[in-house]
Image (cartoon, rainbow, N blue to C red):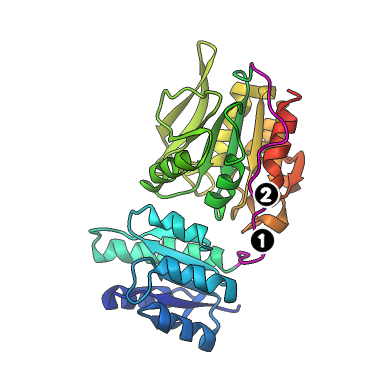
Amino acid sequence: MRQIRVLIVEDSLVFRELLVQNLNADPAITVVATAKDPFEARDAILKYHPDVMTLDVELPKMDGIEFLRKLMPQYPLPVVVISSLSERVFDALNAGAVDFVAKPSGANRAQMEAFMKNELAVKIKVASVAKVGKFKKAPEQMPSQHLSEGTGDLVVAIGASTGGTEAISTVIKEFGTDIPGVVVVQHMPPGFTEMYANRMNNQCRVRVKEARTGDQVLPGQVLIAPGGDAHMRLVKVNGIYQVVIKPGPKVNGHCPSVDVLFESVAEVAGNKALGIILTGMGGDGAKGLLSMRKKGARTIGQDESTCVVYGMPKVAYDIGAVEYQEKLPDIAKRTYSLLGKM
């Protein structure tokens, strides 16, 4: 089996050596080079042709995000950002990074090694099969169709993983305030979901917030499940949709899980729901989307050509959960078309 060739870009000598030691311990990964700044990284890319690059955001000589913006058009390369808790990670994703991991703060050596061998190594393996530089977003535009009043009994559920922050943004930016209440699970570390929701809230016409138990699912509002150790479910209280955030074990390796959300939407909303599954590795959400479709919900899956990783949508499509398969820029339009018939 061919090993994944990794370039590490990190200015801290101690952390850089920890990364090398622990990643090289994984039989599927080999670190071919390290760099302490973007200029060394550029030379290493040309010399070693790595499969994946890990990148710190805070670097000397050139900011990591600026480096990404200059690098990606010339040398499209899967990049996993290693970041402290900062909104800048979303700038990095917007600049072309495939995924990110949250750098442990105050962790002891054992915790740090567990983070590197498990979480980071997994992200690198996913990134190694991701598509980069092959898909450019279409210009954002208003939906071609507007909904009539009375969409309060409808709900839209969205699930995504790798590549999902940008994919969700592309879809939601096209939603107007007439869209039914939207519930979202995006696999993301704790702390980052609130920053992501606030960032989206400033960029979209709809209101976007990190969900809390008891939040009502209202037209023109998007609720994003908080990252951490709790699942988000849809419930109905006195005829009104609400969400419940409750701790639980991982499902399909994730918490929150798309399947858990979709299964609750199938049970509570039935044929008054629309499900969307976007880019991501694995199969989380596929069975839940199938349950939604069996209950009469309309369903949409992102197509292979526009996915960073065509995993979750492929599994959903293969088991018959996807009613319409669409390119990412067309998903909002299809959403409005289907909602207009419900």
Earlier-in-chain disc, 1 versus 2? 1
Indicate the amino acid at tag 1: Phe
| Chief secondary structure of the magenta portion | loop
**The residue positioned farthest toward the bottom in the image shown:** 47
Which residue carries the number 2 mark? 328
329 drawn magenta: no
Tell whether 3 sits left or right of 43. Answer: right
Numbered disc 1: secondary structure: loop
* Image quadrant containing the N terminus: bottom right
Is residue 134 in view? yes
Q: Could you give the CA–CA distance between mark 1 and mark 2, rounded to whole angstroms?
A: 10 Å
Q: Residues within 10 Å of mark 1 (few under 14, many from 20)?
A: few
Identify the residue shown where x is 42% and y is 74%: 23
Residue 135 — which label?
Answer: 1
Is 142 magenta? The answer is: yes
In the image, residue 174 above or below residue 244:
below
Name the element at disc 2.
Answer: helix
Identity, as a three-letter code, of the amino acid under mark 2: Leu
Q: For this rendering, which residue is in front, 140 or 238? A: 140
Q: Which residues are magenta?
A: 129-149
Residue contact between numbered discs 1 and 2, judged by CB atoms under 8 Å: yes
Find residue 141 and report its horizontal and vertical position in percent: 66, 43
